[in-house]
Image: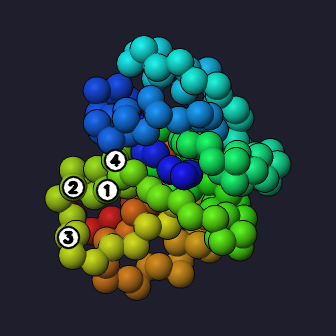
Amino acid sequence: MISFVATPIGNLKDITLRALEALREADAVFCEDTRRTLGLLNAYEIRKPLFSCHKFNEREAAERILALSREGKQVCVVSDAGMPVVSDPGREVCRILKEAGEPYTVLPGANAALCALVLSAFPADRFTFIGFLPEKKTERAELLARYAASRETLLFHCAPQDVDGYVLSLIHI
């Protein structure tokens, strides 16, 4: 079985018991950065083979994950922090697994966007997650212009130094 496993965002104690169980039972762990994942596994005395799965090798990693699963191996896919696929590698892996008819599951856990939504105290009954904003100011303005009339709360990843006047104008406090 292949499990997409959420990992802690900052505090290593924010990992779930199911995530720890899956990591302990895994035959292989595919991760965004092996050094980062090694720190997490070491904190819980878990020793597993680690393989890279990032935006530059995701297709090759997906083929290896598929092959291991078909051999009956337990495989975990993690990102550096939070949920794989959500603004992190894993989308291509999911696509390839789905096309191949290979089953996989998701173990819930930390999610930066939902934590930010709750902390903001903005309305949470309807929201749109946009993901990372484009780096170029003009592209960022074009993307945000499409959502300017939205009535729901908008969530996006943005470094503090990238919060410009246009972004601030979208925030209704």
Residue shown at 75% from the left, 50% from the top? 67
Callout 1 secondary element = helix
Q: Which residue is mark 1?
A: 114
Q: Nearer the viewer, residue 107 or 162?
A: 107
Task: Single out the mark in the foreground, 1 or 3.
Answer: 1
- Residue located farthest toward the front when viewing the structure as drawn: 72
The quarter of the image holding the C terminus is bottom left
C-alpha span from label 3 to label 4 = 22 Å
Marker disc for residue 118: 2
C-alpha span from label 1 to label 3 = 12 Å
Residue shown at 71% from the left, 35% from the top? 52
Task: Single out the mark in the foreground, 3 or 4.
Answer: 4
Badge 1 vs badge 2, beta-carbon distance below 8 Å: yes
C-alpha span from label 1 to label 2 = 6 Å
Point out residue 111 in the picture as x, y percentages from the top left corner.
Answer: 37, 50
The mark that comes first in sequence, 4 or 1, is 4
Badge 2 vs badge 3, beta-carbon distance below 8 Å: no
C-alpha span from label 2 to label 4 = 15 Å
C-alpha span from label 2 to label 3 = 9 Å
Q: Nearer the viewer, residue 85 or 98?
A: 98
Q: Which residue is mark 3?
A: 123
Point out residue 75 in the picture as x, y percentages from the top left corner.
Answer: 58, 43
64 to 85, vertically: above or below: above
Q: Is residue 79 left or right of residue 51?
A: left
Quick one: label 2, few (<14), some, or many (20+) residues within 10 Å?
A: few
C-alpha span from label 4 to label 1 = 11 Å
Callout 4 secondary element = loop
The mark that comes first in sequence, 2 or 3, is 2
Callout 3 secondary element = loop
Badge 2 vs badge 4, beta-carbon distance below 8 Å: no
Quick one: label 3, few (<14), some, or many (20+) residues within 10 Å?
A: few
Q: Which residue is mark 4?
A: 109
